[in-house]
Image (cartoon, rainbow, N blue to C red):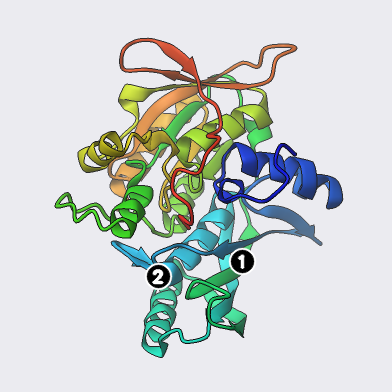
Amino acid sequence: MTKEKILLEHGAGGLLSNELVRNLFLPAFHNPFLQQLTDSAVLELGDKKICFTTDSYVVSPIFFPGGDIGSLAVHGTVNDLAVCGGKPLCMSAGFILEEGFPVGDLAKIIESMAVAARKAGVQIVTGDTKVVPKGAADGMFINTSGIGLVEYPHRIAPGSIAPGDVIIVNGSIGDHGAAIMGSREDLQLDAGIVSDSAPLNGLIAEILESGSRVHCMRDATRGGLGAVLVELAGQSGAELEVRESDIPVKESVRGLCEILGIDPLFLANEGKLALFCPGPDAPEVLEIMRKHELGRDAAVIGKAGAATPGKSGRALLRTVAGGMRVMDLPSGELVPRIC
């Protein structure tokens, strides 16, 4: 560990998060399922495969353009199951409430979670509530776990990424991070930036049920698309090359990022995924995405190359200026408490 105390950056999904996981959690909890470092653990129970995930939500503010902490908790849990090839079935919801939190706001968040769960086709089947003294938490935090059934016959994981795979995203990146920044800092922008928080399981099910081959998927949350590509390159050993000009970014988000000096590649998303599939399957996957409400702006952004013997995988960005740079995990905290 390079730091003696926990910093906000340790929860950002970047370099320090990676260091925390690899240097503390993995050695202590070592097992074959955890070592995969996928969004959900895929487990075999008899002749069935299930996926299991857990997450905690501490987003600030708890109400933001396009959603709130309740719907975000459902969407995040569902998406972590879906990108591992799972059909989300049920989830838990644990609430940590600060003394003095308005009951009316809690009711709004609970209703938001219920609506989001119905839309995603999952049931909230168990939960817990704890109350801590005023000042011991910032309003409320939510912890979830989710279980899904894996029926897709092929392994969806970083190790399945193959040379020639096409990299596809289902739409514009950075929307959630930009919405949180604008809301938190009260920038009062007229650009209408809203979070992309949404359940991806319906879109993913259509792709998998079409018979298209999918090698890997990852939802680009903390650390954004950039961090996902760097992590997948490291896990797969492949050289991933993406074109900056092909990565969809809304002009309103791009403008905010330019004002604040932030790269949208590393802004969080809550309704976007990076998908890797063989080149011949890419046209069908892209067509399915573009017919779905959550994939209308889907785009092919790059490809996977072969691993270089003796070298670790790399994520390369071909810039709009025509140059090439190696992407690294962000070392700082762009936007703390983004999810």
Tell me where residue 327 appears, x and y as whole percent: 51, 24
- Between residues 177 and 242, which one lies in front from this camera angle? 177
Residue that lies at the very extreme toward the left in this rendered image: 190
Quarter of the picture containing the N terminus is: top right
Q: Amino acid at mark 2?
A: Lys
Quick check: 252 above or below 241?
below
Instruction: Kindly identify which numbered label has been placed on residue 175.
Output: none
Q: Residue 146, labelled with which disc? A: 1
Mark closer to the observer (1, 2) = 1
Helix, strand or loop at disc 2? helix
Q: Which residue is mark 2?
A: 119
Determine the image quadrant of residue 17. Answer: top right
Residue type beneath disc 1: Gly
Q: Earlier in the sequence, mark 1 or mark 2?
A: 2
Residue 305 in sight from this viewpoint? yes
x%, y% of residue 15?
Answer: 61, 36
Q: Secondary structure at mark 1?
A: strand
Asked if residue 33 shows in the view, the reply is: no
Name the one closer to the observer, 275 or 65: 65
Q: Position of residue 114 (x, y in %)?
A: 43, 79
